[in-house]
Amino acid sequence: MDVTPLQRLLDSGRDSALLRLSLGKALLDAGEPGLARPHLQRCIELDSAYSAGWKLLGKACLADGEAAAAAQAWQRGIAVAHGNGDQQAGKEMTVFLRRALKALPPPG
């Protein structure tokens, strides 16, 4: 997806959790997790109960080589999803979290 129209909306002063989620997802899909992360972070700042934002933030962090940050995002996202009754998102993030924790070096 071309991020230009989304970026234009943001540049025009329109800002929302959905716009930030869409822009972050488009950048993540384009292989730009480092550029996606600030938009996804802003998404959850605008709406901390947006479980999709937490899920994609974790994916962007992991793709950016930050497994610990991904795990933190998914831990928070799981709690948010359960609070919202969004069982599917909670299950998905639980699977992602297990994988991220396996990728972390052992404590020590």
Image (cartoon, grey):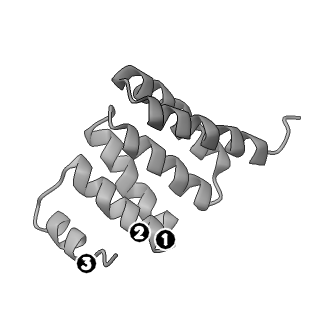
Residue linked to disc 1: 32
Instruction: Specify few, some or many for label 1: CA neighbours under 10 Å numbering under 14, 14-19, or 20 or more.
Output: some
Answer yes or no: do the residues labelled 1 and 2 have beta carbons within 8 Å?
yes
Quarter the N terminus occupies: bottom left
Q: Amino acid at mark 3?
A: Thr
What is the total number of numbered labels drawn onto the structure image?
3
Mark 1 → mark 2, Cα distance in angstroms: 5 Å
Q: Amino acid at mark 2?
A: Leu
Placement of 49 over or under 3, stated as above or below: above
Query: Residue 27 bears which disc, if any?
Result: 2
Q: Residue at x 55, y 31 (%)?
A: 75
Query: Residue 4 bears which disc, if any?
Result: 3
Answer yes or no: do the residues labelled 3 and 2 have beta carbons within 8 Å?
no
In the picture, residue 9 is in which quadrant? bottom left
Secondary structure of the residue carrying numbered label 1? loop
Q: Position of residue 46 (x, y in %)?
A: 26, 41
Mark 3 → mark 2, Cα distance in angstroms: 11 Å
